Image: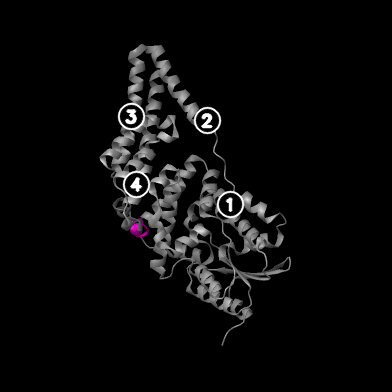
Amino acid sequence: MRLSTSELLHDQPHQIIERDGVTYTVLGTAHVSARSAEVVRELIDTGEFDAVAVELDENRLRNIENPDELAKTDLVKVIRTGKTALFAANLALSAYQRRLSEQLDIEPGAELMAAVEEARARSLPVTLIDRDIGITFKRTSESLGFWERMKMTSGLLASVMVDEKIDDAQIEKLKEGDVLESSFQEFAAESPKIYQHVIAERDQYMASALREMSGARNVLAVIGAGHLQGLSQHLRTDSGNPQQLRETLNSTKPKSKIPWFTILFAAFLFGGFAWGFHQGGAQLGGDLILRFITLSMIGGAVGATLAGAHPLSILGGAAASPLTPLHPALASGTISALIEATIRKPTHEDFMDLRQDVQTVRGWWRNRVSRTLVNFFLTSLGTAIGVWTATAGMFAKLLG
């Protein structure tokens, strides 16, 4: 016997909101619950809804539907366009979800795909209401200081590289919340900025996307339970133009056309060299330059070596290290990773095994794709250590 909508919803977290002639049934689901997927299918099968909205964006849906899409990634293009960190963060999140699916025997977000598949089967329009995950990562990163970004990135990567079970507390959090929130759980608790961009902004973004839907009178919105209260509040009370709101929440800081940090650091560095020549002549000035070049090259080379890079990648990273502070295009991590991706070009199998390999520390070094990313980060880190060590030593010597 088929249950009615009210019977299906009676024990499920939900809100029913009427606005502008549209009835929105907002269902809060558990991303790791098989029961949530069943309820979603049964609700759509009642035939009472004329449109379905889901907490997905186009990229996430495409990756779920076409796992082979990852194998088409142009790693060299990713590195050249400065999207290496975003690509690595997506891999980290993917690995975390993979561990969840293996431990709980259900793919996180299965209820979202159930909504898409069931709606399509009944020829109902499907609207993807979530913000692109890349924009969420970027806006989060832009709001943090350097050390906060380093802590968040290293913590996120460390959490997925440790091959251990997800603990009960995290699982319970997922039953009530959101995969992204759980991934950033430790940092969101300490940083209101992270919570704002990862959760609160997406509540408002998805509410605006629902308001933009046209032609529907009875909408089923399937979202993680962690968004239920916030999204529902925005859906009831927001009065601004929904398209403008989404554009605002999609905006990121434009890159400055003038690289002020690079200019100031270069002026600081060359000023130190000039002062060295003025104070101690060619011997002191030359010694300072040689020391800077040597320490920065050693830092970059050590980083690339620890990443297991090809000898030519190590040499390329080392050679670029002294130039890294002077121009972003000459960054040692980028140069070394480009050489690595060209010489040790990842195979189709590397991409196919990527989600599995990045679940362990050994896997990050074994897989050519992830090892290239490790090469980028460790070479960059090594160069940064070398550059700042040399710079600090130079001014200590000049002022001593």
Q: Splitting the image into 4 quarters, where does residue 312 fall?
A: top left
The 10 Å Cα crowd at callout 3, few under 14, some 14 to 19, many 20 or more, is: many
Residue position marked by numbered label 3 in the rendering:
295
Q: Is residue 317 left or right of residue 104?
A: left
Residue position marked by numbered label 4 in the rendering:
372
Q: Amino acid at mark 2?
A: Trp
Q: Amino acid at mark 4?
A: Thr
Q: Quadrant of the C terminus?
A: top left
> Which disc, if any, is residue 260?
2
Quick check: can you spot residue 400? no
Task: Identify the mark nearer the N-term, 1 or 3.
Answer: 1
User: Residue most toward the bottom?
Assistant: 1
Q: Amino acid at mark 1?
A: Gln
Residue 213 position (above or below residue 159): below
User: What whole-number distance in Å separates the C-alpha atoms at marks 2 and 1?
Assistant: 28 Å
Q: Nearer the viewer, residue 80 or 207?
A: 80
User: What whole-number distance in Å separates the C-alpha atoms at marks 4 and 1?
Assistant: 32 Å
Q: Measuring 54% from the left and 38% from the top, which residue is drawn there?
A: 255
Residues marked 4 and 1 touching at CB (< 8 Å):
no
Residue position marked by numbered label 1 in the rendering:
196
Foreground mark, 2 or 1, reads: 2
Q: Nearer the viewer, residue 19 or 257?
A: 257
